[in-house]
Image (spheres, helix red, strand yellow):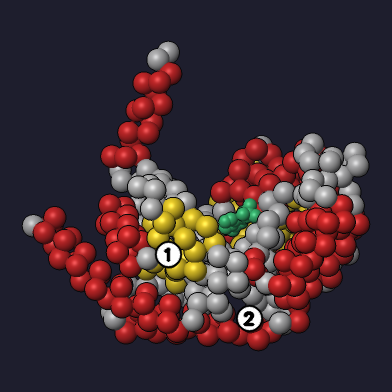
Amino acid sequence: MDYDAQLDSALDRLHQEGRYRTFIDIARDKGHFPHAVWHRPDGREQPITVWCGNDYLGMGQHPVVISAMHEALDAVGAGSGGTRNISGTTVYHKRLEAELADLHGKESALLFTSAYIANDATLSTLKVLFPGLIIYSDALNHASMIEGIRRGGGLKRIFRHNDVAHLRELLEADDPAAPKLIAFESVYSMDGDFGPIKALVELAEEFGALTYLDEVHAVGMYGPRGGGVAEELGLMGRIDIINATLGKAVGVVGGYIAASAKMCDAIRSYAPGFIFTTSLPPVIAAGAAASVAHLKTDRALREKHQTQAKILKLRLKGLGLPIIDHGSHIVPLIVGDPVHTKMISDMLLSDFGIYVQPINFPTVPRGTERLRFTPSPVHGPKEMDALVRALDSLWSHCALNRAELAG
Ligand SMILES: Cc1ncc(COP(=O)(O)O)c(C=O)c1O
């Protein structure tokens, strides 16, 4: 085979469809986030404001987090030096797991190097732990859940997004005695809509199924102590396994599940994605633990976050822009075409110093390409004004452009 030609044609396809991904090289400015510097391809540096990050609450620069990380680094050095089983379990890991178990009102929590790995490793291992397990998965579940379910093999059923009636039909069609698990998310990150958690839990109880909830886009931001949407709804105790990340609202990196002690023990003992990999550096665990502990008490930060999202949505709606509003903190602006989405994103960046990455297929369906804004408590009125003004002027420019292309 001509390997180079094969790679060229794979990459050409992406270019032709306008969805070749270009990474924007930025340096965040600690203490001044969302301000950052863009290292342009031409070698120049340009100040920018980040509007698409998932450091939703600005915890990546919070003094409590930074000082916990400094302390841990000075105390024990850089890496953990091993897998959890072989010298890589430290007091920092244990403390963070206790903090997370407490956050979700569960007996235990189990750390992974990311929420992607946590989803993939846990879901694939559940198929091993429960032979014959049927997994019912929401059609818009994250790639990491899809991958875990696929890799685990065995039976799976995909229910239409948030369609409880469709899920019921699928459950009714299967052997009542078969072990079952329903996997879904609390906040779907691309549209910002909520999963019908209560209805899904009720259905699971009726059919004797386990529940698996991904709270990656909710932990830290929803619930009285930041335990997520399940906490807000008083449903944490009825969910069997909660998954989330330490890389978004918590502001560091890593992922975890929280569940019963027995469930965590079994996953810990059987999941290759947990067993055969170096554990998170203690410095990361220390920063994440400080962040989670802080977020349990900082309701004002959560309220400010929601207020910021409401203001941005109101202002963009006021301009007549086609945003999706499901009442969450995520503000997607639908452009509907990969080339235009990239064009607007490029112009926002180079002409206005506003960074929002274009979101294309396969992350979202074709024809719904979008810009996804993530307002946070650290975006001030000045930044918000600049964004709204830039979008106002660019949107009309692009509408003209689109009309020209269509004509
Ligand atoms: C719903 C969902 N689950 C899991 C993940 C993976 O999280 P992490 O970045 O910690 O791997 C993401 C990442 O964007 C996500 O959106």
- Quadrant of the rendered structure where residue 95 is? bottom right
Q: Earlier in the sequence, mark 2 or mark 1?
A: 1
- Quadrant of the rendered structure where residue 390 is? bottom left
- The amino acid type, in three-letter code, at marker 2 is Arg
Quarter of the rendered structure image containing ligand 1: bottom right
Number of dots carrying numbers: 2
Q: Is residue 343 found left or right of 267 in the rendered image?
A: left
- The amino acid type, in three-letter code, at marker 1 is Pro
Residue count near mark 1 (Cα–Cα under 10 Å), binned few <14, some 14–19, many ≥20: some
Q: Residue under circle 2?
A: 302
Work out whether residue 50 can be spotted.
Answer: yes
Name the residue at 61% across, 43% down: 147
Q: What element carries label 2?
A: helix
- Coordinates of residue 327 in the picture (x, y in percent): 50, 79
Comparing marks 2 and 1, which lies closer to the viewer? 1
User: What residue occupies the far top of the structure in this picture?
Assistant: 1
- Coordinates of residue 407 in the picture (x, y in percent): 8, 57
Q: Is residue 187 found left or right of 316 in the rendered image?
A: right
Q: Quadrant of the N terminus?
A: top left
- Coordinates of residue 20 in the picture (x, y in percent): 37, 43
Pick whichever, 348 or 144, lies toward us.
348
Residue count near mark 2 (Cα–Cα under 10 Å), binned few <14, some 14–19, many ≥20: many
Work out whether residue 241 can be spotted.
Answer: no
